[in-house]
Amino acid sequence: MSEEALLKINGHEYTLPVTVGSEDEIGIDIQKLRAQSKCITLDPGYGNTGSCESAITFIDGEKGILRYRGIPIEELALKSNFIEVAYLLIWGELPNKAERESFSNQLTEHALLHENLKHHFEGFPGSAHPMAILSAMINALSCYHDDFTCPNSEETLETASAKLISKIRTIAAFSFKMFRGEPFRYPDPKRQYVSNLLHMMFSLPHKRYDASPVITRALDTILTLHADHEQNCSTSTVRMVASSGANLFSSISSGVCSLWGPLHGGANMAVIDMLEKIHQGGLDISKCVEMAKNKDSGFRLMGFGHRVYKNYDPRAKILKGICDEVFDELKIDQDPLLDIARKLEEAALEDSYFKDRNLYPNVDFYSGIILRAIGIPTNMFTVLFAIGRLPGWIAHWRELYLSGDKRISRPRQIYTGHTERSYTPMEER
Ligand code: SDX
């Protein structure tokens, strides 16, 4: 394997060192490029640019491979659970019995919000989007836990992680209750993570909500599938913000804001919106596929395509199977949106436009259909994505913090504006 790259420009030759990862990915190290050649690289959207070296998650987009700390997502989805996976992502190894018990106890211990924080919800209009509430409340949390906002030891990081992972669930449930105009339901210390989330969302003073094991397991697996995805937009945002020395809570809050976008975590909402429009409009599937191919139509096949996966997103494959389990459990034998989704997928996968561009269903294509079947409203979908992605964001914040790389992230640019010109006085404008 060549240990260096050769760059010829402006009549000069520059040799650039090469980094090879544990899965033989090759990175041309350009850290000294500008100093040597006065040139920079240009890569809008960073599709060809590595921002860091990381040991957390490996994706092979061509082969549709996703592994957390080396363990294939298929195995984790089948054999593990969200809290164990959160521990694996953050600390690099699956927890042993004692570690899992200690972390689980911390999650129970830190499930409540400070009572003053409860009043923050009254300041939001009933129509407030839960993602706006989530990012605001995570920052507000830092005011009540300022001793954990910059964890500088594994012990304080474990407590900070437990606080965030446990309280994000309470914040999500309280925002859901506010949206529904129902009284908040407090966490039940006897319930496991997902069962407690569903309890806080759906229990009422006069009616307990106990989700079936199939539904609880399905949602737990959805969170596991969303737990990390290397340098995606929101995780890169968390790392970018953390590079300025910003605390863990504010870095996470910025990740929530990035995830909200419809091209990223907001796609699960956009998929349902798309399917409902097709259903209500009685639109013809083949016409929808044609529209998605026509850039001027402004219509994209939401839940399709991916910056990295140029093969079927392995998470979408698993979610497709969970769809059937949930629909069987809920005895839903007919769901028009699922039918439309399946027909869209079939039509797109046979169409050369999608095949030529390696556009396949991604994690968002089926997740919304499952969440909707469970009774979770569309505006909470991306909040569920954020709950799932939180351990990944924490893992990357920790990795950056431990890396000792204290340089602030600050990309360069190629300036294309006016060259120097003088100020024009008002009378001459
Ligand atoms: C997530 O990064 C991650 O890991 C993200 C994520 C995670 O876990 O964090 O996996 C979660 O965000 C999944 C993606 C959810 N977003 C969507 O489903 C929105 C719909 N998909 C797209 O907008 C798009 O595919 C992206 C944003 C996901 C990827 O965009 P890219 O890599 O910038 O690709 P592109 O826009 O340059 O598209 C390449 C070509 C273009 O056509 P040409 O210019 O080559 O003719 O494919 C076309 C695009 O027009 N295209 C689509 C399309 N997605 C890409 N055409 C129709 N429908 C689509 N969905």
Image (cartoon, rainbow, N blue to C red):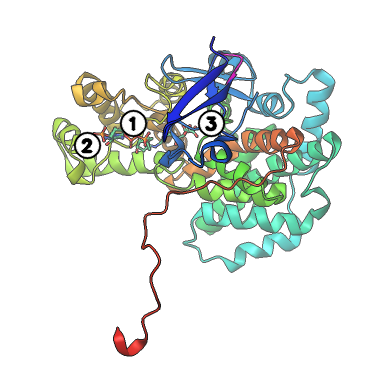
Q: Residue at x 61, y 58 (%)?
A: 136
Q: Ligand 1 is located in which of the four quadrants?
A: top left
Q: Which residues are magenta?
A: 19-23
Instruction: Label 3: state its secondary structure.
Output: loop
Q: Which residue is mark 3?
A: 50
Q: Nearer the viewer, mark 3 or mark 2?
A: 3
Q: Amino acid at mark 1?
A: Phe
Q: Is residue 77 above or below residue 286?
A: above
Q: Which residue is mark 2?
A: 292
Disc count in the image?
3
Which label sits on residue 57?
none
Q: Residue at x 21, y 41 (%)?
A: 295
Instruction: Label 2: state its secondary structure.
Output: helix
Residue 168 visible: yes
Q: Is residue 127 above or below residue 168?
A: below
Instruction: Label 1: state its secondary structure.
Output: loop
Please tell me whether the stretch drawn in magenta is mainly helix, strand or loop.
loop
Q: Residues within 10 Å of mark 1 (few under 14, many from 20)?
A: many
Of callouts 1 and 2, which one flags the residue occurring earlier in the amino acid sequence? Answer: 2
Q: Nearer the viewer, mark 1 or mark 3?
A: 3
Alpha-carbon distance for marks 1 and 3?
24 Å
Is there CB contact under 8 Å for labels 1 and 2?
A: yes
Alpha-carbon distance for marks 1 and 2?
10 Å
Which label sits on residue 304?
1
Q: Amino acid at mark 3?
A: Gly
Pointer 1 residue Cβ closer than 8 Å to ligand 1: yes
x then y, percent, for residue 332: 37, 27
Pointer 2 residue Cβ closer than 8 Å to ligand 1: yes
Quadrant including the N terminus: top right
Q: Amino acid at mark 2?
A: Ala
